Amino acid sequence: MSTATATHDDHHDHGPAKGLMRWVTTTNHKDIGTLYLLLALVNFFIGGAMAMVIRAELFQPGMQIVDPQFFNSMTTVHALVMIFGAVMPAFTGLANWLIPMMIGAPDMALPRLNNFSFWILPFAFTLLLSTFFMNGGGPAAGWTIYPPLVLQMGDGFPFMIFAIHLAGISSIMGSINVVVTILNMRAPGMTLMKMPLFVWTWLITAYLLIATMPVLAGAVTMLLTDKFAATSFFSAAGGGDPVMYQHIFWFFGHPEVYILILPAFGVVSAIVPTFARKPLFGYSSMVYATASIAFLSFIVWAHHMFTVGMPVVGELFFMYATMMIAVPTGVKVFNWVSTMWKGSMTFETPMLFAIGFIIMFTIGGFSGLMLAIAPSDFQYHDTYFVVAHFHYVLVTGAIYSIMAATYYWLPKWTGNMYDEKLGKMHFWLSTVSVNVLFFPQHFLGLAGMPRRIPDYAVQFADWNMISSIGGFVFGVSQLLFAYVVIKTIRGGEKATDQVWEGAHGLEWTLPSPPPYHTFTEAPQVK
Amino acid sequence: MTRKAHNGRSSMRVAIVAVAMFGFGYLLVPLYNVFCELTGLNGKTGRIDEAEVAARYQPDVSRTITVQFVANNNADMPWEFGPVVATMKVHPGQIYATAFTARNPTGHDMVGQAVPSVAPSKASRYFNKTECFCFNQQPLAAGEKKEMPLRFIIDPKLPADVATLTLAYTVFDVTQVAMN
C-alpha cells in the first residue's frame, strides 16, 4: 500500500513520508487504518494459536499436553486477545479507512489523537502477553476476570489490569474521534439519514464504547485497589460483595458484545446490496433497529448471571428484556433477505462471507434466545453450549464480516483485485471447518460438558475430537486468508474505480487505490 | 468558528461523557448496596437496638419458625468454627440467644471476620440482630477457643409462607488486614 500515491500527480498530494518513521508518526487515516488492520491480523493469529493449544489439549480426554493452569490462561488470553486485540482493532481499522471516504471528509477529525490511540495498542498487548513470562503465569480466571479467583493471580496481575486500561483508553479515544468525525466532517448534502449504514452502526458503536469502556476501567481499578490498596469492593470479609463485580462487569460486558457486532451489521448492509444489485431494503428501519439494539444492550446484563441467586422478578425482567433484542435483530435479518429477494445476485467472495454471516449469525442468535430463557439457562450456564453460542456470533458473525469487508474493500485500498479462486477456497474451507468445529459444541454443552476445563468425562470424547479436527482445519485455512491478503497487496489484476458493478457510495468514486489525501475539497452529495 | 475549534469543542463534550461514565462505575457501588438493603437481596441481615425491641415488636406465639444455623470457612481459613445448636424453634417478636464457637488451632494469633447471609433472601430483611459476633472482627490467640454470642429477633411481619430460615456465617481470615 506504500505505492498508493506513485501514479497520482495532483499537486496537493504530497504523499507519505519515507521509511519506517512514516508509520510511527503518521496522522493519515488510511495509514492508521492499515496499521489497525495489520495489528488485528497479527493478534488474530496469536489468539488463534492459543485456540489451537486449547483444541489440541481437548482432542482426547485426560491431561495430554499442557498443565491445567496454563490451559486456563490459554482460554483467558485467547478471549482477551481476540476481543480487544483482533475484532475491535479490525473494526477501528475499517472505520479509519472507510468513514472519511464514505462521508466525503479529508481525514478523521482528530488525526494526532488517532495516531496516539493506535500506538497505545501494541504496548497494551505486549504488557498482556508479557505476563506469561512472570511468576504465576498469565491471567487464568477467564476473560471476565471475576474476583476472588482473579485476585489469586501472580505477579502478572497489575500488568494485565494496566493492559486493559490501555486498550480501553485507546478505544475511548478512537470512539471520540469517530463521533466527532461523523458529526462534524460530513460533506455538504450528506445528511445523517443519507449516511451509509456502516457509518451509522459505527456512530452508535462509538457511543456504546464511550458509555461502557470507562465502567470496565472502573471495575478493573477496583480489582487493583482490592489487591494492593486494602479496599474491599469485592471482598466479603471487608463488607464488599464479589457478585457486585459481576453486575459492574456485565454492565460493560453486554454492550461490549454489541460493540463487536454492530459494525458487522454495517459491513453486511454495504455488501448485500452491491451483489444483489438492489438498494438496501428498509434503510431507515435498519438505523432504528441498530439504535434499539444499542439501547436494549444496557438493560439486559444480568442474563449472564442468572445462576447467582437473583429473585424471580429479576430473572423475568432480564429474560424478557433479552428476548426483546430478537425483534430489532430480526428486522435486520429480514431486511437483508428482502434486499436479496429478486435481486440479480452474484456470489463473489465478499458476498459469500456476507451470506455466511447472515445464516450462521442467525444460528448464534437462536442459541442466544435459548440461553435467554432463565429456567433453561440453569442447565446451559457455563457449559460448551455457551461456547458454541458466542463463537457462532463472534467467529461466523463478527470475524466473517471482517473477512467479507477485507475482500470487498481490499481492491479499493490496494488497487489490485484479490485472487477470486483462492478467496472462494478460503470461504468454503472456513465455512465447512467452522461448523465442524463449533456445531458439535452445542451437543457437548447440552450433555453437560463444562467450559474452561482441560479434561472431561469420556462420554464427551467423540464430539471433542471432531470439534478439534474442525478447529485445526479452520486454523490452517486462515493462513490462506493471510496469503491472499499479502498477495493482493503485492500486486494482481488492476481494479477499476468502482471495483464492483453494483457498488454505490462516495468511496467508489475515488481512484483505486485512492490517493494519499482524498476529498481535500468536499464532494457535493445530492 | 474554525473547523478545528469546532472539532475540539465536540471532542471535549464526548470526553466529558467518558469521564462521567468512569464515575458512574464507582457510583454503582453505593447504588448496589442501597438496592440490596431495600430489597433484602444478598441475604444481608438487619441490626436493631435491644432497647427498641419492646416498642416495635409484639410477640406472636401462634407462629413457630425453624431457624437453622450454618457455619462455613472461607478458603484457607483454618479455624474450627460452628454453631452451638444446629436449629432452634422460635416465635416471631421475641428475642432469642444462641452462640457459635471458634477455635484457632494454629500456632499464631489470628483475627477473623464472620459475614452473615440469610436464606431465603426475601426473609433477610425480617431477621434482625441485637448482638452479634459478626459486628466486629474477632481476635483469637494461638490455640484459643471462644464462644461467641448472638441475639436475634424475627420481625412478626415475616411473610407467611416462610417457615424455615437459614442463617449462614462464613468466617474470613482478616489477620493481614487487621495488623495493618
Image (spheres, coloured by chain):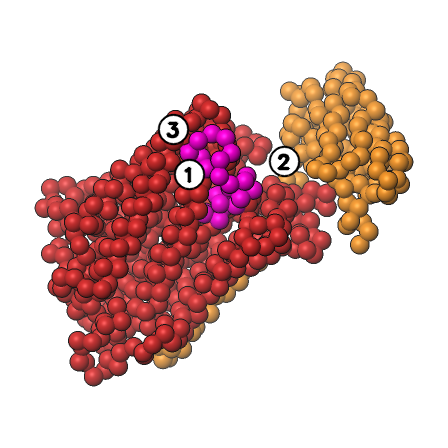
Chain colours: A red, B orange
The percent position of residue B71, horizontal first and vertical second, equals: 75, 29
- Can you tell which of label 2 and label 3 is closer to the viewer? 3
Tag 1: amino acid: Arg
The percent position of residue A12, horizontal first and vertical second, equals: 23, 82
Write down the chain letter for disc 2: B
Q: Left or right of A47: which side holds B36? A: right
Quickly name the residue at label 2. Answer: B41
Quickly name the residue at label 1. Answer: A55
Q: Which mark is residue B112?
A: none
Residue name at image x 22 percent, y 64 percent: A490
Q: Pointer 2: residues within 10 angstroms few (<14), some, or many (20+)?
A: many
Tag 3: amino acid: Trp
Label 1 SS: helix
Q: Pointer 3: residues within 10 angstroms few (<14), some, or many (20+)?
A: many
Quickly name the residue at label 3. Answer: A463
Q: Pointer 1: residues within 10 angstroms few (<14), some, or many (20+)?
A: many
Relative vertical location of residue B108 with respect to residue A4 in this rendering, above or below: above
Q: Tell me whether the residue at label 1 lies in contact with that at label 3, contact meaning CB atoms closer than 8 angstroms.
A: no
Q: In this view, which residue lies farthest toward the bottom?
A: A11
**Closer to us: A456 or B76:** A456
Write down the chain letter for disc 1: A
**Which region of the structure is painted magenta?**
A57-79
Q: Left or right of A293: which side holds A103? A: left
The alpha-carbon separation of the residues under discs 1 and 3 comes to: 12 Å
From this viewpoint, is residue A254 visible? yes
